[in-house]
Amino acid sequence: MSLLRKLFGRRDAAKPRVRVCVECGMPIAEHKPWCSIFRTQQAMNQRAEDAPTAS
Ligand SMILES: [Zn+2]
């Protein structure tokens, strides 16, 4: 019970809004390894890095 009270009691404290992933429910900085959104992100990053700068 004290835990709940702690949680609700802290509602007043202005805490920074953390964007949570809709897929894994974790903060976007802490995706689960199995998260598909995370994987997509990784793939995109990889592609961006691998992309040859055609010049
Ligand atoms: Zn995620």
Image (spheres, helix red, strand yellow):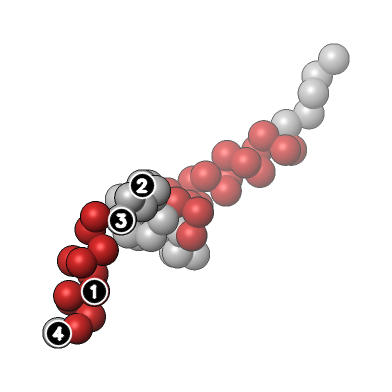
Q: Amino acid at mark 4?
A: Met
Which residue, given by chain and number where applicable, does mark 1 sit on? 6
**Residue shown at the point (50%, 54%) measured from the top left:** 29
Residue 55 lies, with reference to residue 18, above or below; the image says above
For mark 3, give the secondary structure.
Answer: loop
The nearer-to-camera label among 1 and 2 is 1
Q: Which mark is residue 22?
A: none
Q: Quadrant of residue 6?
A: bottom left
The reply to whether discs 4 and 2 touch (Cβ–Cβ < 8 Å) is no
The reply to whether discs 3 and 4 touch (Cβ–Cβ < 8 Å) is no
Placement of the N terminus among the 4 image quadrants: bottom left
Which residue, given by chain and number where applicable, does mark 4 sit on? 1
Q: Amino acid at mark 1?
A: Lys
Inter-mark Cα distance, 3 to 1: 11 Å
Residue reaching furthest to the top: 55
Inter-mark Cα distance, 4 to 2: 25 Å
Q: Amino acid at mark 2?
A: Arg
**Depth check, front residue: 24 or 34:** 24
Q: Which mark is residue 17?
A: 2
Inter-mark Cα distance, 1 to 2: 18 Å
